Image (tube, grey):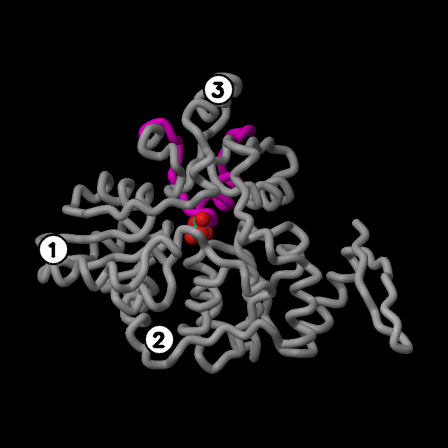
Amino acid sequence: MELTTTTLTNGHHHQVRVSSDQLKTEVRRLARERDAVILAHNYQESDIQDVADFTGDSLNLAKQARATSAKIIVFCGVHFMAETAAMLNPAKLVLIPDLQAGCSLADMVVPHQIRQWKAAHSQGVVVCYVNTSAAVKAECDYCCTSANGINVIESIPADREILFVPDYYLGTYLKTKTKRNIEVWKGYCPAHAVILPERVDALRDAHPDAEFLMHPECGCLTKQMDLADKILSTEGMVQHVRTSPAKTFIIATETGILSRMQKDNPEKTFLPASEQAACHHMQRNTLKKVLWSLATLQHRITVDPTLARRALVPIERMMAVS
Ligand code: 13P
């Protein structure tokens, strides 16, 4: 693939053509020179995954961010993930290639709403999905990802009333699985919301031997929970398709994950449950922006230390439960 980039010579801007391979070589060279580690979420475009030191789900990326000895973390994901990395490793320079790469789901709950609920439920505890801002995490008691949600809920004393924010579908899944007293917030991920049960049913009819894998953020989850062969985090899906004897898979999550699955398993077939299930925030990061980020050391993600100290309480509980 060819990309155009602009250079400045003698005061004039020139458009030059560079191949994505040239860009990748330059990204890797600069990452070495800067002592930077590149972390990429499973939804990132395959060019970014190609240059990443580590690709994974939210939980594994947080673990990598904490463990790295590199001076710089280039976080190719969305803002809350980079923010979590910055809190877990405050001595590092944490960069995100596009500052607008946010999370519509994370924006569906704000700190004062948590404070309000707590004021009305003095014995209640609040569990937030990692897809929340640091300011929301600072008001919460526990944090979890889709990979460890059940274990986090089960680590909470059984008599406690729980509020789960902000994802309705993950919250409903956790409530069903753990049979705990959980009030579930009504937030949702717009990318997962376009995955419709009718379309999943049609695909399953057309491919009766296919395995149906679903992310717990899926809008169709409440109708399809019993029908899914597996409900998994993004990394859970990536690992499962490697070892499963099935040849065809229906994948109900953001479509960016399919390129990694296809690359890892060229002999298998991967069908998106919806071609429209794309996260426009994730797609804001591009290979060119990763290079720009390394070259300019922007955009730096920082969290106020007082806020971070509070937000780290639920985050540490999340990290302790795998
Ligand atoms: P995972 O933790 O499964 O990678 O999911 C993160 C996410 O934001 C899904 O939309």
**Residue type at numbered disc 1:** Arg
Residue 107's spot in the image, x, y percent? 39, 56
**Residue type at numbered disc 3:** Ala
User: How far, Cα to Cα, is label 1 from label 3?
Assistant: 41 Å
Left or right position of 43 against 149 = right
**Residue type at numbered disc 2:** Ala
Q: Which residue is drawn at 48% across and 42% down?
A: 191
- Mark 1: few, some, or many residues within 10 Å (few <14, many ≥20)? some
Residue under circle 1? 160
Which image quarter is the C terminus in? bottom left
Q: Which range of residues does the magenta coloring cover?
A: 226-249
Residue 106's spot in the image, x, y percent? 39, 56
Q: Nearer the viewer, residue 317 or 266?
A: 317
Left or right position of 159 against 206 = left
Between disc 3 and disc 2, whose residue precedes? Answer: 3
Which mark, by number, is residue 202? 3
Task: Label 2, secondary structure: give it.
Answer: helix
- Residue 245 in magenta stretch: yes
Residue under circle 2? 308
